[in-house]
Structures are given as structure tokens and as C-alpha cells.
Image: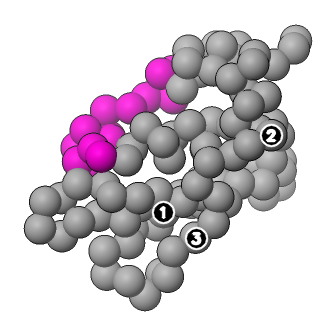
Amino acid sequence: MAYSEKVIDHYENPRNVGSFDKGDESVGTGMVGAPACGDVMKLQIKVNPSTGVIEDARFKTYGCGSAIASSSLATEWVKGKTIDEALEIKNTDIVEELSLPPV
């Protein structure tokens, strides 16, 4: 299976790679994956404490091209959303946007 242009773009030009200071009280950190199989993603969001809006997001992903592209896209999508709005993003939404095979 060939990757879509969107996957290739996010893989070759990933957005929001990096990390925030984990000591910052406005930063939340999550990690998913299985080191044994090779895909691990760390996602951080920076939330404005007065508005509850995600102002920025960063990620570090170790894995295949689709894992990196999915992480990059997710960080773009959560910016400007509240946490509740971001929680509505499903893995199937990302799969559809990147034209990946069904999960």
C-alpha cells in the first residue's frame, strides 16, 4: 500500500515536533504505544488556564511513517479546541483524513 500525499507531507514535514517543560502547570502529557512493537507517541498540550483552550501542542513519536503523520495531524487538530472538543477526535477521524487503511 502506498501512503497518501497527506501522510507523506506530515511524515516529511512533521508539525509541532518537540516537547514542553513538564514542570509547567499548564502542560498536560500523555504517552501511548508499545515499545516492544516499536510505535510510541508522547503528546503534550498547553492549555490556557483562564479559557480552557489548547493553545499549543507538541509530540515525539517513534514509529512508522503513518504513526508520525497521525501524531503531526493530531497536534494541528487540537489547537484552538477545549479539552472536551479535543476528546471528540477519534482515531477513525485521523485514519479517514490521512486515507489510511481501517483500524
State the count of labels: 3
Residue 84 is a magenta residue? yes
Q: Identify the secondary structure beneath mark 3.
A: loop
In primary-sequence order, the first of circles 1 and 2 is 2
Disc 3 target residue: 19
Quarter containing the N terminus: top right
The residue lying toward the viewer, choosing from 21 and 64, is 21
- Asked which quadrant contains residue 100, the reply is top right
Q: In the image, residue 58 lies at what x, y percent?
A: 54, 60
Distance (Cα) linking label 2 and label 3: 19 Å
Amino acid on which the number 1 mark rests in the picture: Gln
Dot 2 or dot 3: first in sequence order is 2
Position above or below: 51 against 78: below
Q: First in sequence: mark 1 or mark 3? A: 3
- Give me the residue at 38% from left, 83% from top: 24
Label 1 SS: strand
Label annotation for residue 12: 2
Indicate the amino acid at tag 2. Glu
Taking the spot 58% from the left edge, 70% from the top edge, the residue there is 19
Density class for disc 3 (Cα within 10 Å; few <14, some 14-19, many ≥20) is: some
In the picture of the structure, the residue carrying the numbered disc 1 is 44
Left or right: residue 28 versus residue 93 is left
